[in-house]
């Protein structure tokens, strides 16, 4: 039997779904010829579909080396890179795939998804337009294209596309849900409510539909309907983290702190990231009096929440003996400088021995103490400790920034969240901030992290924004340096990321951009454009049908204030 005969037999088994026999034959071919393209490619696809992503990337990368201009190999490599979150190289692979084969609709579709994740709505729209044209209006392509158009403010185009789909399938709940969100973003809240309620009536088991409806009811401040809806959701999904978390944020916004803290604590236990089972006989704190007790405080979920709840420590320490506080290791130096009397330890595996101190009376997640420390609006007015950046590093960055910006105001920018379960919901497409190019006499500073940092630089070059960037800084590795860089600016404009929290926790002027029709996030809740947690924060949300232009207008006024001697 020739090598080609073995390949043909393997392909036949592969087509029939007999993957084990197909994989065995592909490996037989590779034993004889490690560069056999079809065997590398198809075995890589089998591993990818089976979730063996590391092996799939290795095989498909080898196939790409053998045939760098094979569109199908590039496409399959791009898919597995997308699956593993390697967005930058996934874009490169999928871009090459569609350049080599422009008629590959699936390649355009997935490339569009990637650009959407990277907050590049124009590129996403272009890709979805190509997919739409190649699939003759396939519903999936129509929906993705309409979503991209809505992000860009092309509401009439987006609405028309969904109306065509609904004309053919008037009771398709997925079409109705997307249509509702487009109507909502365009400012037609009443029409949006009709559409989303109809979607729920048809398919009530979809949790996402309920979240969309909740957002609309929040905008109308219909608290009775919201309470009934949460009651229904609690019955449908009694153990759901996101349901409990969203309801907690609703109660925070309504100053109902007892209910908010109870749900907040329960949501974290459901998520399982906190309240973990420590190998200790010390009981977990469940609200008992802490006066005179010995406590170990364990880490909260994310960097933002850890920064938020550090303010509890002096109040806890005034009542109890705090033996140790566990934090993300990147925060230790920052926290230790701000609260030198506290013993901070990093969260590590195996657990740091001081977290397992059996002389403690309780161990408790730091954020849980909000239920006894923030029970009323007056409690939030307590002067929080300002966290402190390294003064030497602040002086260093001040000198660097002033050398580049002169006397011009410097505004730090961060537009995207990465590695988050709500990354896309938190982020903003850079094109929505194009109006910043109109400002003279001001410099902007790149405070972005991850792959988005490079895209922020490219965007600034394209539209002519004077953007300072110090690539030697990396907030994912040196948070202390990042905090000092933030402190050296005049104002920070950021979406909901750790950058916004660092700025706010240091008492620095901070504008937090909260994308329209999304969750409140407990840490930004408060009155209109204010946060109960951070007195120097201004929260801004786009207006229905208008987008972010009002932020540009507000920033124009702020810049004039910053320029005053």
Image (cartoon, rainbow, N blue to C red):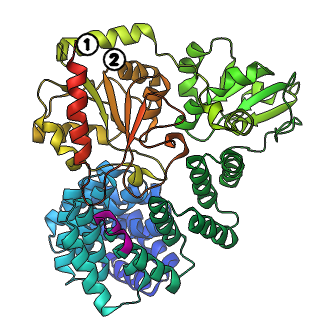
Quadrant the N terminus occupies = bottom left
Q: Secondary structure at mark 1?
A: helix
- Disc 2 crowd rating (10 Å Cα; few below 14, some 14-19, many 20+) is many
Residue at image x 77%, y 28%?
Answer: 296
* Tag of residue 400: 1
Most extreme residue toward the bottom is 168
Earlier-in-chain disc, 1 versus 2: 1
Q: Is residue 426 left or right of residue 363?
A: left
**Secondary structure character of the magenta stretch overall:** helix
Rendered location of residue 530, percent (x, y): 45, 38
Q: Which residues are magenta?
A: 184-190
Using the rendered image of the protein, determine whether residue 68 is visible from the camera's viewpoint.
no
Per the image, is 327 magenta? no
Rendered location of residue 200, percent (x, y): 51, 79
User: To which residue does mark 2 refer?
Assistant: 488
Rendered location of residue 466, percent (x, y): 15, 29
Quadrant the C terminus occupies = top left
Rendered location of residue 25, percent (x, y): 44, 74
- Nearer to me, 31 or 564: 564
Residue 440, above or below 105? above
Q: Is residue 101 left or right of residue 238?
A: left
Snapshot quadrant of residue 397: top left
Q: What separation in Å lies between label 1 and label 2 (alpha carbons)?
A: 9 Å
Snapshot quadrant of residue 556: top left
């Amino acid at each position: 039997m020739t090598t080609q005969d073995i390949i043909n037999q393997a392909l036949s088994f592969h087509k029939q779904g007999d993957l084990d026999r197909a994989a065995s034959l592909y490996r037989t071919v590779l034993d004889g010829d490690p560069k056999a393209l079809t065997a590398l490619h198809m075995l890589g696809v089998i591993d990818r579909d089976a979730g063996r992503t590391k092996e799939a990337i290795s095989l498909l990368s080898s196939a790409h080396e053998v045939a760098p201009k094979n569109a199908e190999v590039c496409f399959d490599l791009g898919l597995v890179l997308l699956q593993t979150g390697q967005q930058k190289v996934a874009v490169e692979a999928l871009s090459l795939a569609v350049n080599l084969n422009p008629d590959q609709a699936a390649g355009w579709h997935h490339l569009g998804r990637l650009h959407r994740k990277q907050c590049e709505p124009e590129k996403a729209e272009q890709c979805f337009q190509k997919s739409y044209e190649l699939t003759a209006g396939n519903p999936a392509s129509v929906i993705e294209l309409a979503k991209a158009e809505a992000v860009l403010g092309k509401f009439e185009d987006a609405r028309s596309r969904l109306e065509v789909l609904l004309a053919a399938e008037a009771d398709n709940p997925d079409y109705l849900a997307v249509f509702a969100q487009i109507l909502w973003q365009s400012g037609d809240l009443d029409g949006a409510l009709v559409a989303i309620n109809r979607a729920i009536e048809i398919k009530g088991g979809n949790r996402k539909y309920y979240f969309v409806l909740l957002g609309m009811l929040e905008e109308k401040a219909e608290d009775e309907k919201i309470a009934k809806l949460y009651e229904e959701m609690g019955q449908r999904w009694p153990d759901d983290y996101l349901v409990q978390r969203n309801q907690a944020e609703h109660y925070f916004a309504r100053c109902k702190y007892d209910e908010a803290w109870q749900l907040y604590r329960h949501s974290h236990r459901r998520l399982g990231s906190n309240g973990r089972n420590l190998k200790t006989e010390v009981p977990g704190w469940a609200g008992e009096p802490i006066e005179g007790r010995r406590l170990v405080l364990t880490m909260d979920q994310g960097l933002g929440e850890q920064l938020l709840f550090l303010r509890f420590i002096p109040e806890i320490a005034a009542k109890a003996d705090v033996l140790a506080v566990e934090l993300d290791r990147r925060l230790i130096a920052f926290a230790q400088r701000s609260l030198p009397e506290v013993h901070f330890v990093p969260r590590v595996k195996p657990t740091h021995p001081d977290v397992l101190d059996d002389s403690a009376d309780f161990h408790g997640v730091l954020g849980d103490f909000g239920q006894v420390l923030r029970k009323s609006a007056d409690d939030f007015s307590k002067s929080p400790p300002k966290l402190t950046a390294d003064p030497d590093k602040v002086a260093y960055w001040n000198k660097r920034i002033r050398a580049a910006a002169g006397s011009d105001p410097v505004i730090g920018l961060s537009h995207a969240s990465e590695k988050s379960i709500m990354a896309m919901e938190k982020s903003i497409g850079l094109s929505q901030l194009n109006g910043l190019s109109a400002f003279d006499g001001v410099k902007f500073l790149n405070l972005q992290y991850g792959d988005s940092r490079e895209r922020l630089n490219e965007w600034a070059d394209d539209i002519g924004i004077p953007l300072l960037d110090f690539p030697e800084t990396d907030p994912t590795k040196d948070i202390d340096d990042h905090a000092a860089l933030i402190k050296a600016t005049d104002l920070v404009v950021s979406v909901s990321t750790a950058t916004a929290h660092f700025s706010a926790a240091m008492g620095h002027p901070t504008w937090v951009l909260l994308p329209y029709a999304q969750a409140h996030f407990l840490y930004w809740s408060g009155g209109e454009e204010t946060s109960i947690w951070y007195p120097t924060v201004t929260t801004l949300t786009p207006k229905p049908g208008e987008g972010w232009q009002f932020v540009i207008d507000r920033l124009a006024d702020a810049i004039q204030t910053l320029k005053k001697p």
